[in-house]
Image (tube, grey):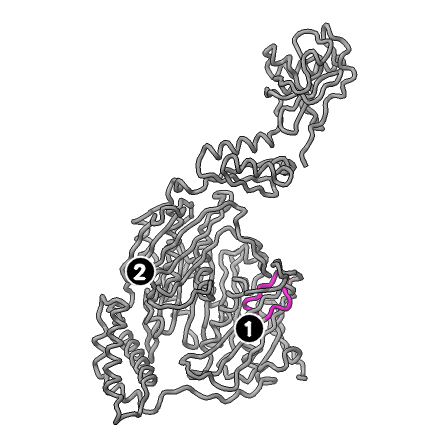
Amino acid sequence: MLEVKQFSAVVDGKTITIETGKLAWQAGGAVTIRQGDTMVLAAATMDQSIREGIDFFPLRVDYEERLYAGGRIPGSFFRREGRPSENATLIARLVDRPLRPLFPKGMRNDVQVIAYSLSADGETPIDVLAIVAASTALTLSDVPFLGPVGAVRVAKVNGEFVINPTYQQIEQSALDLRVAGTREAILMVECGADQVEESVMIEALQVAHKAMQPLIDVQEQMREQVGKPKREYEVSALPDGIIESIRTWVGDKLEALYVGGRTKAQHGDAMEALQTEMLEALISPENETFDERSLRKAFQEIYKEDVRKHILEKNLRPDGREPREIRPLGIEVDLSPRAHGSGLFSRGETQILTLATLGTPRERQELDTLQPEEEKRYMHHYNFPPFSVGETRPLRGASRRDIGHGALAERALLPVIPDLETFPYTMRLVSEALSSNGSTSMASVCGSTLALLDTGVPISAPVAGIAMGLIMGEGRYVVLTDIQGAEDHYGDMDFKVAGTRKGITALQMDIKITGISTELMSEALQQAREARLFILDAIRDVIPEPRPEMKPHAPRMTVLKIDPQKIGAVIGPGGKIVRGIQEETGVRIDIQDDGTIYIAATDGPSANKAREMVEALTEEAVVGRIYTGRVVRVTDFGAFVEILPNTDGLVHISQLDSERVEKVEDVAKVGDEITVMVTSIDSDNRIRLSRQAVLEGWTPEEAMQRDQRNRRSGGSRSGNRGRGRRDSGSRKPSKSS
């Protein structure tokens, strides 16, 4: 059993406590982290031996969202957590990204970091705590790790930056920024924002980097006091002399690869031809010094060096572009005849088709997570089929990458989506990556804007996205606009920026180096803004604003507001009435607990008919209005007439006719239809009616005056005295359950 040690750091006045030694003794390193009543456990472990046959570092980060942390039982049939929710997957990716660059180059041992939510107070977000917990577990463990990493979340409330805000403060903020970094530089950025200017974003990044320093301090203190010695590991390296041999053979042959206008496939064919020539030259029965696999890997290293050198020294990219140059754009809308909206966006060989579907509010997604958000009515999903990169593989549903890219594009568009009152629909957008050569996620942002405009969704502004890259060398760097696949693979940064003309709506930064400065990020943001405005101009030229009319087959939403007590009258026993309306009219009806009713129909007559049927079920009687109703009960002092469904009133015998009435049944029998006017409704909702007012053509004012006069005189009138003295006034209308 290990000795329990507890350490604390104060971040913007909030105490964060990290404890080790109590839980998970056999992990390489394990800690719990706590802020308020939110607590996360993280454990890090490394395999003893390397994984053979791979040329990458096998890191696996998992976050397990346990609903017991919030005192909840999962809502599934099995009542246990199953596949990770989208939220859990996004947190796992968030934790992974700042850790991955900080492992030694060439290490091939499997490393796994697992984080659990042990307690969630509903106020403190878990994500940045999970990053710090994972970093601390690695820092204290025997796993070689170049950390520690600090992480904070930043909001801006009432003009002031707030570090590690509560969920309620995030709701009030136009900025939701998550930043992770080392002592010296920033490693990871994830952000959603409501059109925030670049200067504000840079200031927030600087504030975040400063705020995370106490978390780095406490991890270094813990490492000194309770950290384990780091384990030795075997470095995966190329055979001695192989790089020099290939470099000598290659000479200036790589220059032929820098040809503008080539497709990705043509460039790949040229690379393969050169590698084949190299293998034939360097492998022979007389020369078996190097194997084919090592030669190919070494060739890629040399090509990587050459690509970076050309960019740094000549400002020449693999496809012949200059650093700020954007690939040719292709923009179309209205491709799918039956989707409610569609947009096709291409940038070079990256092509995204986004299709939009509108639904009723009840089709919103219900969420079963530890976050306060319980549902959402705007969803964006992303799919990356293997044919998009000319490959084959089994389809296994949404991958972590699919979920992450979909969430990023969703976050980018969310600030411009109209609210429910303005646009009473649920919206689902699906971006299909049909061809990929760099930054399909940002192309999805552009495709989604096109689909929303084509659908006729009144978004407040179009949104575009661009991916920025970075090549760093000794004493110099180049920021690249609109990176393609090779530049992402060989470069040092993938910095995705989305926004409107006014400002930024989403950021995501992944880097392969040990950090970048806020000054460099500022330059990248300004360069991204130029590109974003260029793309927005191109979108405006094709579809400048949302279509004024939705497609003929898109649902038209009619919104009614009724008394919540009348919901039962619309639904009926077991839903019989509402089902009958839907079957008769062909509409879809969604009834909310507050009495809001949404009627979705693809044509006006169906919507109008359904609306009339609902209104008839929920209409309130109005004084002075004339109704034709059915007699439902007869007494010796009058007749009760149902003028609306489940609503009836009393026609006193003195108001049944223009002449004296001896017996109520002489004028009105049960089942008869008669036309009456409402003359009064009292505080108990009892209704008085008059047939005489209709027969004699009285105005509503005259009818009310005569009704009041009759009641003051005991309910009698000339020729019919005394008939109303048993009148109890009226019967309270019956209510449906």
Q: Is residue 257 above or below residue 505?
A: below
Q: Find residue 518 and report its horizontal and vertical position in percent.
A: 42, 69
Instruction: Confirm whether residue 568 shows in the render.
Output: yes
Question: Where, quadrant-wise, is the C terminus in this rendering?
Answer: top right
Q: Amino acid at mark 1?
A: Val
Please name whichever residue, 338 or 270, is drawn nearer the observer in this view of the structure.
338
Horizontally, residue 508 falls left or right of residue 711, namely left
- Is 125 included in the stretch rendered in magenta? yes
Give the labeled residue for mark 1.
132
In the image, farthest residue toward the bottom: 286
Determine which quarter of the picture holds residue 467. Answer: bottom left
- Is 109 included in the stretch rendered in magenta? no
Question: Where, quadrant-wise, is the N terminus in this rendering?
Answer: bottom right
State the residue at coordinates (61%, 11%).
Answer: 695
Provide the residue span drawn in magenta.
Answer: 116-132
Please name whichever residue, 531 or 327, is drawn nearer the observer in this view of the structure.
327
Q: Is residue 286 above or below residue 604?
A: below
> Along the polypeptide, which appears first: circle 2 or circle 1?
1
In the image, farthest residue toward the top: 719
Q: Find residue 343 and report its horizontal and vertical position in percent.
A: 36, 52
State the residue at coordinates (21%, 80%).
Answer: 253
Badge 2 vs badge 1, beta-carbon distance below 8 Å: no
Residue 347 - label: 2
Q: Amino acid at mark 2?
A: Arg
